[in-house]
Each structure stands twice: as C-alpha cells, then as structure tokens.
Amino acid sequence: MRLGQMLVLAVLQGVTELFPISSLGHSVLVRTILAWHIPKASPDFLPFLVVLHVGTATALLLYFWRDWRDIFAGLWKARGRASNPEARLFWLLVVASIPAGLIGLVFEKKIKLLFANLLVAATFLIVNGVVLLIGDRLKKRRSDHSLEQMTWGKALTVGVAQAFALIPGMSRSGVTVVAGLGRGLDYAAAARFSFLMATPIIGAAAVLEIPKLFFIKGHVDLGAIFLSGVVAGGFAYLSAWILMRYFNKQEVQALRPFGYYCLAAGGSALLWYFL
C-alpha cells in the first residue's frame, strides 16, 4: 500500500467510524471507485487495519476517560455487582456488546466476503440513510430518557442493532443511536451510549488481530502504518468532540443531514456502478 492510500483510509476510518455514515461502506466505495487494488494478502494490509482500529479505540478511550474512570470506580465499589449507576452502566455495555461479538465470530468468513462488494456497500448506505431518517421520526414520538433510565432490554436492543453494522454500508453509530432513540433515549444519551459501546467492540477486534502481526512475512512499512493509526485516532477524537456537542444541542432532526447524505452517496455509487 502507498502512503497516500493509507492516509486517505485513515482519515475515512477516523471520521466515518463515529459519524453515522459507515466507515466500512466508505472504505469499500473509495477503494473501488478509485481503482485501488489493495490485495488482502499484502503483508502490510492486516497490520494497517489493526493499527487503524487501535488508533480509533484509543481516541475514544481518551475522549471518554472520565466516563470509564467513573465506570470502573463504581464497579470496584460495588464489588462487581450492578448496585450503583456506574457499575450498572458497565454491565449494560457488556450486554449490548454480546450480539455483535457472537454474530461476528460465527459468521466472520461470510461477512468478509462482502467487504469488497461495492453493490452491497452502496445499497446498504441507502438503507442506512432511510434508518437515520426513521430515527428522527422516532425521536418525535418518544419521551426523552437519560442513561440512568436505561434498562437491560433497551441495552440488548441497541446491541442487536449494532450487529447490523457488520454489513458494509450500515453505520455502527447510526443504527445504535437510532435504536437508542427508538427505546426512548434522547440524542445525547443515545450517542454517549453508542460511543461508549464502540471502545470495547473496536478494542476487542483489534486484540483478536494483534497476535497475527507476529506472523507477517515480507516488508512492512511500520512508520507509515503507525502514522496512519495516529491520523485515524486524531480524526476519531475530533469526530467524537464535534458529534457530542452537536447531539447535545439538537432537539429534533439531528440525524436528518446524515440520512440525506447516505441516500445521495449510496445512490451516486449505484449510478456509477451501473453506468
């Protein structure tokens, strides 16, 4: 892989992992439309992906460090039980992370077959746009709840929604925020829960892949890969900062701009594909 390609994909990862517009979908679209033939067997492809995810997970951990500090302090105080709000939030995040983790492990090979399919990515970008627009309509019809009112059933619903983001074009943050809105959370609470969920799920994926780095054969440009991880992390941190302020200020139709963007991006990609 060339340095320019790495940096473009790093920026895409950092921005679109949190913006509800699908990082995987955009990666497929950009690589296909620009005719970047990046073989997955390339010795630097796997470490590149791992470092990008480590960068993103690190950025989220840094941005929400106070939340995680309070969560683990509460868990320690409760001796592992869900007897205080912080410890309870920890177990809610665990429950919400289970569906995507299980589905990802069971269907890993089948899901990977979709990763280079532009038709799938473009189609589900449109589906993602529709989901985001539906989310705004759900917001109008539901009462606003904070995370303190989150139930085990609501957490599981958000977790099941997260599993759909394994499909290229479906945004992890988008579907989880919409699921949270559908279960009565306000924009800020739904976004906060979604972003907190991202740290363990992205971190777990990185941990599973890191041991493979020790078995890589061939020349690997570790400097370029490390730089890409820093870039992805920097843009992920900036995205979290922007989006949390955006959702805190928006009372209605916060997802509508992203929904229209996904419809336009997916539709344009389909036109490019068939024409």
Image (cartoon, rainbow, N blue to C red):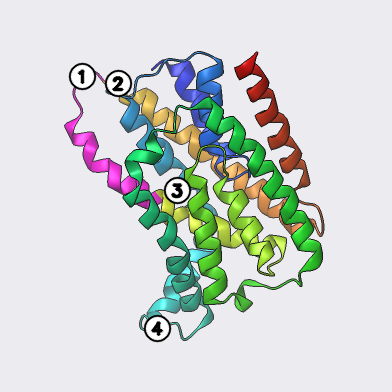
Residue under pointer 3: 57
For residue 46, above or below residue 111 = above
Left/right of residue 163 with respect to residue 135 in the rendered view:
left
User: In terms of sequence position, does the residue under pointer 4 or pointer 3 come before the other?
Assistant: 3
Q: Is residue 214 magenta?
A: yes
Tell me whether the residue at label 2 lies in contact with that at label 1, contact meaning CB atoms closer than 8 angstroms. yes
Judged by depth in the image, the label closer to the viewer, 4 or 2, is 2
Q: Is residue 22 magenta?
A: no
Q: Position of residue 268 (x, y in %)?
A: 69, 24
Quote the CA–CA distance across marks 4 and 2: 46 Å
Label 1 sits on what residue type? Gly
Quote the CA–CA distance across marks 4 and 3: 26 Å
Q: Residue 42 got which mark?
A: 2
* Category of crowding for the residue at label 2, using alpha-carbon neighbours closer than 10 angstroms: few (below 14), some (14–19), many (at least 20): some
User: In terms of sequence position, does the residue under pointer 1 or pointer 3 come before the other?
Assistant: 3
Quote the CA–CA distance across marks 2 and 1: 8 Å
Dot 4: element: loop
Residue under pointer 4: 81
Residue under pointer 1: 218
Q: Position of residue 86 (x, y in %)?
A: 50, 76
User: In terms of sequence position, does the residue under pointer 1 or pointer 4 come before the other?
Assistant: 4
Q: Would you identify the image quadrant in which residue 54 lies? A: top left
* Category of crowding for the residue at label 1, using alpha-carbon neighbours closer than 10 angstroms: few (below 14), some (14–19), many (at least 20): few
Label 4 sits on what residue type? Arg
Relative depth, front residue between 4 and 29: 29
Position of the C terminus, as image quadrant, is top right
Q: Residue 176 got which mark?
A: none
Which residues, given as a range, are shown in magenta?
203-219
